[in-house]
Each structure stands twice: as C-alpha cells, then as structure tokens.
Amino acid sequence: MTTQKTIAVLGATGMVGSRVIDEAGARGHGVLALSRKPVDGRPGLTPVAVDANDPTALRDALTGAATHGVVPDAVVVTLRTFPVDQEFLVGATRTVLDVAAREGIRVLVVGGAGALRSPGDRDLILADDPTYVPAEYRAVAVAGIAQLRACEDSPGADWVYLSPPALLEPGERTGRYRRGTDTLLTTADGRSWISAEDLAVAVLDELETPGTDRHITVVHQDRQAVPGAGSA
Ligand SMILES: NC(=O)c1ccc[n+]([C@@H]2O[C@H](COP(=O)([O-])OP(=O)(O)OC[C@H]3O[C@@H](n4cnc5c(N)ncnc54)[C@H](OP(=O)(O)O)[C@@H]3O)[C@@H](O)[C@H]2O)c1
C-alpha cells in the first residue's frame, strides 16, 4: 500500500504541472499547488500563490511559513518561461534544492530532453545533435542542461531529474510507459514521445517508489511492446 504524501508542484498551472496535480490527487496525495496565479482549490489541494522569482516566497511555500506549517514530502519543479530564461530557471531550481536539502524534501525536476545522450552515440548530448534539437530549440535545451548541473551541484539534496522524450504533449492517460536513465528512448516505431498525462504517471511512480538513478527518462509504451518496464 502506498503511503499518502504531500506533494508540492511548482508550475501547477502548466501543461506538466496541471497533469501532475491531477495524478497526485487521483492517487490520494495531498497537493500544494504553487503558481503565480493560484489554481482553483479542491479537496486535498491547497493553492499557494508564489512567484518563483522571489526566493523568500518560494522558501515560505516549502517550509510551511505560507501553508500553516505544511511541509511537503516532495516538490516537483515544472517551470518554463517563454522566451527561455536560463538564469531564472537555474536560480529558482537552486532555491528549491537549498530549501529541500534543509527540510529533507525530495525534489523531482521535470527538465528537458536536450540533457539526454543521443541514442546512436552516448558521447553526444542531444542538445548538440541537430537531428533531435534544431538550432531554434538549442537555447531551451542548454537551459535544461544548466538546470541539471544545478542539481548535480547540490549534493545535500535528494533530487532526480526527469528528461521527457523528444515530444511531450497533452494526450491520453494510458499508464503505459518505459523508463530509462540518461539516454533518449524511442518506441518500437522509432518515435520518442509520451503524453503529458503519462509523464505525470511516471512522476508519481517515481515519487511513490524512488529509484536510485539521478537522471531518468521515459517513453510511451506500446501495448504489444516488451513487458517488464513501465507500470500503473
Ligand atoms: N520534450 C521536452 O524536452 C519537453 C517538452 C515540453 C516541456 N518540457 C519541460 O517540461 C517542463 C514543464 O513544461 P510545461 O510545458 O509544462 O511548461 P508550461 O506549460 O509553459 O508551464 C510552465 C509553468 O511555469 C510556471 N511559471 C513560469 N514562471 C513562473 C514564475 N516566475 N513563478 C511561478 N511559476 C512560474 C507557469 O506558471 P504561470 O501560470 O504563472 O505562468 C506554468 O505553471 C519544463 O522544464 C519544460 O522545459 C520538455
């Protein structure tokens, strides 16, 4: 039986964050939904207004100062800006890691596929592989790598960095996915994709049953594909 947790989601209004709060709620976990514009409250979900540019507000949201003493067991970082703002992304992630290290909160960062290794060449980072990351997406990919480095520079924190596959978009919750570590995964037909709903399933699986890998990735699992990996 899974122990119920309190999970903070930073970026709760986003494509990924909104699916993560739905999946967490459906599994009976308490949710602290952190965003600039608070999401609607519902049983088990506490909206917390936070601008991640404000380290004090971020600390207060994670240490209980802004939540009547509720300190989450885990925080999921699902921040994104348009255009990409690497300084903001790394700064907010560092603040989360610092607070989490002090409070004993597990951190799951939903980052970018660009930080993965290329499937055909382990020495090639996807951000440097134009087959997967065209020039116009390179700055986003590089920012995702900087976010991973911020995690690696935080030895005191209990973190995991989840790189989505190449394509991540709203879709169906199938509960079927395959999990890997630091190399891009593809489906049997060679595509690298997952729905945001299934990515949220993978996020909650990782929080409920933490693995030992720091850098993980997932991909959609076809119904007929190899058994033994992916779940829910
Ligand atoms: N294939 C890939 O590698 C791939 C594809 C898609 C996404 N991703 C990654 O997945 C993660 C989540 O992306 P997404 O598509 O879910 O992004 P999204 O839909 O744009 O949502 C971003 C979230 O960040 C929040 N945010 C931005 N600035 C903030 C601030 N100053 N304070 C508080 N919250 C702030 C937004 O809240 P507001 O409502 O306040 O703006 C929103 O909730 C990102 O790391 C992204 O790079 C990767």
Image: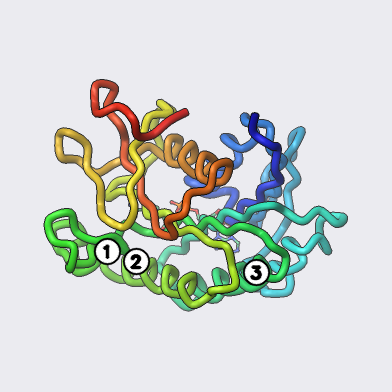
Query: Label 1 belongs to which residue?
Result: 137
Q: State the image coordinates of residue 204 (x, y, percent, origin top left).
A: 54, 41
- Amino acid found under the numbered disc labelled 1: Tyr
Label 2 beta carbon within 8 A of ligand 1: yes
Quarter of the rendering containing residue 18: top right
Q: Is residue 131 left or right of residue 37?
A: left
**Residue nearest the observer in this picture, 19 or 226:** 226
Can you name the residue that lies furthest to the top here? 224
Q: Which mark is residue 140?
A: 2
Asked if disc 3 and disc 2 are in contact, CB closer than 8 Å, the reply is no
- Amino acid found under the numbered disc labelled 2: Val
Q: State the image coordinates of residue 152 (x, y, percent, origin top left).
A: 46, 72
Q: Is residue 56 above or below residue 26?
A: below
Tell which circle, 1 or 3, labels the residue nearer the N-terminal end.
Answer: 3
Asked if disc 1 and disc 2 are in contact, CB closer than 8 Å, the reply is yes
**Residue nearest the observer in this picture, 76 or 227:** 227
Q: Which of pointers 1 and 3 indicates the residue nearer the eye?
A: 3
Tell which circle, 3 or 2, labels the residue nearer the N-terminal end.
Answer: 3
Give the structural element (helix, strand or loop) at label 1: helix
Query: Label 3 belongs to which residue?
Result: 101
Q: CA distance from mark 3 to mark 2?
A: 27 Å
Q: Is residue 200 left or right of residue 52?
A: left
Q: Is residue 197 above or below residue 7?
A: above
Q: CA distance from mark 1 to mark 2?
A: 5 Å
